[in-house]
Image (tube, rainbow, N blue to C red):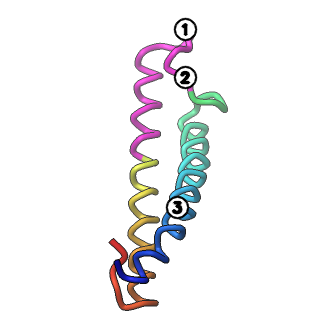
Amino acid sequence: MKVAKIVYKPVGLVLGASAGFLAGALFKQAWKVLGHDDDAPDATDEYRTWVEILVAAALQGAIFGTVKAAVARGGAVTTRRLTGTWPA
């Protein structure tokens, strides 16, 4: 295993945690912009409709997936620029 790949492992963990935090913050803002409550519904919230719960879950998944992919790709590109090796 190359050194760049070994070094990237902890960096990737930090990037992943950061992406999760960022995605959560973006989702909260998007949910507010859509005119809903401050908190998104939980799947087991009996006072929320199916539509509201499923829309919230789909939006959250889309935002999380996009942010995670963008952060991971950015980290890999930066690693290649710094080391000359792709970290995967």
Helix, strand or loop at disc 3?
A: helix
- In this view, 81 is above or below 87: below
Residue under pointer 3: 13
* Picture coordinates of residue 21, whole percent (x, y): 60, 52
Residue farthest along the front direction in this orientation? 1
Residue 59 sits inside the magenta stretch: yes
Q: CA distance from mark 1 to mark 2?
A: 9 Å
- In this view, 29 is above or below 68: above
Residue in the picture at 61% in, 38% down: 32
**Total marks drawn?**
3
| Left/right of residue 43 with respect to residue 62 in the rendered view | right
Q: CA distance from mark 3 to mark 1?
A: 36 Å
Q: Pointer 3: residues within 10 angstroms few (<14), some, or many (20+)? A: few
* Picture coordinates of residue 49, whole percent (x, y): 47, 13
Instruction: Name the image quarter holding the N terminus.
Output: bottom left
Which portion, as a residue range, is magenta? Answer: 41-62
Q: Pointer 2: residues within 10 angstroms few (<14), some, or many (20+)? A: some
Instruction: Give, as a three-letter code, the residue at label 3.
Output: Leu
Helix, strand or loop at disc 1?
A: loop
Residue under pointer 2: 42
